Image (cartoon, rainbow, N blue to C red):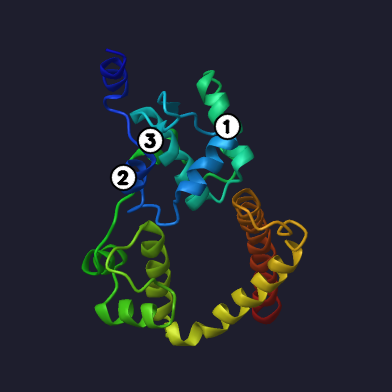
């Protein structure tokens, strides 16, 4: 009888493996360790069977998707995401920092994926430009692409109109690698322990630092433009 009651209670709930199967197509970096880390940080609270196995409800899945979208698309640290979710649960929905109008409803919807042909159409690009962007490392060598790839390809289309091809932008990749070296050096103290929690904190901090670097880089480029074209 107890076993039947537990099966009834757990009906509709998903195991960690089923959660990964459901979310991994949109979040390839998701792993059992990351799910456990998010639980340890108080961001999600799956139920447990009598045997101690985690079980995730549909609302847990929606919450996980929202957290992962905020991390991936808005580069928000977990503490900010947690604060926002807690405020939302009490009805105090404040605007997310640097969220560019992201709403809970839009974040919970499944991210759109594009084939190569759909990607080219969405960005107004030729198939040759798509291939050049992949070869130059500005797009992943994949069969399915997210919104970020559309944004990058759209930018490459505009640059191409002024005669700037992906192959001309190799200095940007070199600069990005140099910037990562600076970030990596700054994270030395954070990365002393090689465990899941430490790696997650380092990843979040690296994204925060990259956002600050974006601000400085944009200012420097505008300053150079002003100096040379004024």
Question: Residue 190 at x, y = what percent?
Answer: 73, 56
Q: Residues within 10 Å of mark 3 (few under 14, many from 20)?
A: some
Q: In the image, is 8 to the left or to the right of 227?
A: left
The residue labelled by disc 2 is 22
Determine the residue positioned at 74% across, 68% down: 185
The residue labelled by disc 1 is 42
**Lower position in the chain sequence, tag 3 or tag 1:** 1
Q: Secondary structure at mark 1?
A: loop
**Lower position in the chain sequence, tag 3 or tag 2:** 2
Q: Quadrant of residue 19?
A: top left
The residue labelled by disc 3 is 61
Q: Is residue 205 above or below residue 84?
A: below
Q: Secondary structure at mark 2?
A: helix
Question: Residue 22 at x, y = what percent?
Answer: 31, 45
3 and 2 marks in contact (CB < 8 Å): yes
Q: Residue furthest right?
A: 189
Disc 3/disc 1 C-alpha distance (Å): 15 Å
Disc 1/disc 2 C-alpha distance (Å): 21 Å
């Amino acid at each position: 009888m107890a076993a039947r009651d537990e099966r009834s209670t757990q009906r509709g709930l998903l195991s960690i493996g089923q959660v990964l199967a459901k979310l991994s197509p949109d979040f390839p970096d998701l792993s059992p360790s990351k799910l456990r880390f998010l639980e340890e940080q108080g961001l999600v609270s799956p139920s447990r069977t009598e045997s101690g196995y985690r079980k995730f409800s549909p609302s847990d899945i929606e919450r996980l998707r929202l957290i992962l979208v905020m991390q991936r698309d808005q580069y928000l640290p977990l503490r900010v995401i947690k604060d926002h979710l807690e405020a939302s649960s009490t009805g105090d929905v404040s605007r997310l920092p640097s969220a560019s109008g992201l709403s809970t409803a839009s974040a919970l919807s499944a991210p759109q994926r594009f084939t190569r042909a759909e990607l080219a159409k969405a960005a107004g690009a030729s198939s040759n430009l798509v291939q050049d962007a992949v070869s130059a490392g500005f797009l992943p060598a994949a069969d399915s692409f997210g919104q970020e790839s559309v944004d990058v390809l759209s930018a490459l289309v505009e640059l191409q109109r002024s005669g700037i091809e992906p192959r001309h932008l190799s200095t940007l990749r070199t600069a990005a690698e140099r910037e990562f070296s600076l970030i990596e050096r700054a994270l030395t103290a954070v990365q002393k322990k090689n465990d899941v929690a430490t790696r997650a904190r380092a990843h979040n901090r690296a994204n925060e630092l990259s956002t600050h670097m974006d601000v400085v880089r944009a200012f420097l480029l505008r300053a150079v433009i002003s100096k040379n074209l004024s």
